[in-house]
């Protein structure tokens, strides 16, 4: 059973460019969340997708956008890259179920290391 | 907004000994989950243990156990019989039980294990 996978592993971009990161959730999971983890810090929530819609969003500018596909995989797009966007970007998947749409434990992918020069 | 605080940036433990990592959180909610995640140098975040706030019994997973004090909003992780492979960053995380709620992570504790 494949866990959460992310691509690419590493990425180097220059300021002002745009980047797309990809995530495939763990088998059986339908909800994907994205996090930014700066060096030496804990992950910061960017947004969460369920049923191809953004359900929750953290304190990130509109330069950060996302998408979820019918097969539950997801993309994170960042436009007009800044030096401060350099970080490890983590994808986490979980299963949302029940009438209350409760979401269980998240499982994380290995991350994409983005460096902005 | 919820906050999670880990006041120990770094800790060391001798192999085979016991260490406790601290975590406090702030919330006005009554129904939530708490987690400890481990992030080894290879960077993939791994779930260590999970606690549901409505359960009074402390969660245990092999050598890992928690001390959950709901009134004090404290959630510490005890690692018994420490092994070299336990060396990693440990993150405490909070999640509301409400719909689609995000995780709030602490800043992490780096655990060193000495042979």
Image (spheres, coloured by chain):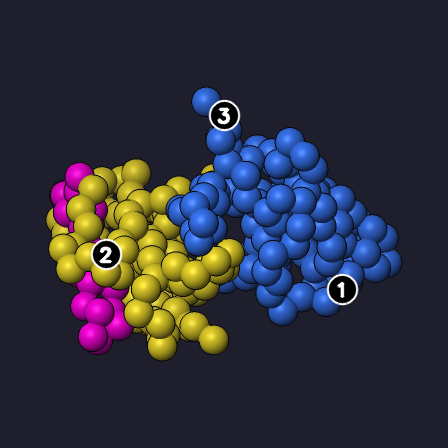
Q: Secondary structure at mark 2?
A: strand
As drawn, the label of residue A62 is: 1
Answer few, some or many: residues within 10 Å of disc 3's Cα (few below 14, many 20 plus, some between 14 and 19): few
Residue B90 shown left or right of residue B100 in the figure: left
Regarding residue B105, the answer to whether it shows in the image is no
Residue A70 shown left or right of residue B88 in the figure: right
Q: Residue at x 28, y 47 (%)?
A: B49
Residue placed under numbered mark 3 in the picture: A2
Residue A4 shown left or right of residue B114 in the figure: right
Same-chain status of marks 3 and 2: no
- Residues at marks 2 and 1, CA–CA distance in whole angstroms: 37 Å
Exactly how many numbered labels are in the figure? 3
Which chain does yellow denote in the image?
Answer: B
Q: Position of residue B18 (x, y in %)?
A: 14, 52
Q: Which residues are magenta?
A: B62-82
Closer to the eye: label 2 or 1: 1
Which chain does blue denote in the image?
Answer: A
Chain of the residue on which disc 3 is drawn: A
Work out whether A81 lies above or below B17. Answer: below
Q: Residue at x 55, y 44 (%)?
A: A31
Chain of the residue on which disc 2 is drawn: B
Residue placed under numbered mark 2 in the picture: B77
Rendered image quadrant of residue B109: bottom left
């Amino acid at each position: 059973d494949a866990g959460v996978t992310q691509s690419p592993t590493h990425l180097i971009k220059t300021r002002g460019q745009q980047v797309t990161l990809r995530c495939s959730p763990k088998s059986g999971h339908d909800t994907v969340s994205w996090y930014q983890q700066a060096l030496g810090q804990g992950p910061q929530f960017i947004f969460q997708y369920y049923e191809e819609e953004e359900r929750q969003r953290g304190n990130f500018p509109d330069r950060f956008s996302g998408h979820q596909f019918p097969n539950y995989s997801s993309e994170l797009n960042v436009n007009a890259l800044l030096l401060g966007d350099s970080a490890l970007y983590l994808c986490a998947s979980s299963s949302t179920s029940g009438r209350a749409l409760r979401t269980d434990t998240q499982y994380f992918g290995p991350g994409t290391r983005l460096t902005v020069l | 907004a919820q906050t999670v605080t880990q006041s120990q940036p770094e800790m060391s433990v001798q192999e085979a000994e016991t260490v406790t990592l601290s975590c406090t959180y702030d919330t006005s909610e009554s129904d939530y989950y708490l987690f400890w995640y481990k992030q080894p140098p290879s960077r993939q975040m791994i779930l260590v243990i999970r606690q549901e706030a409505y359960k009074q019994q402390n969660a245990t997973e092999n050598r890992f156990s928690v001390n959950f004090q709901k009134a004090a909003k404290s959630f510490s992780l005890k690692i018994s019989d420490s092994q070299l492979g336990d060396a990693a960053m440990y993150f405490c995380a909070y999640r509301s039980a409400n719909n689609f709620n995000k995780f709030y992570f602490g800043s992490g504790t780096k655990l060193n294990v000495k042979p």
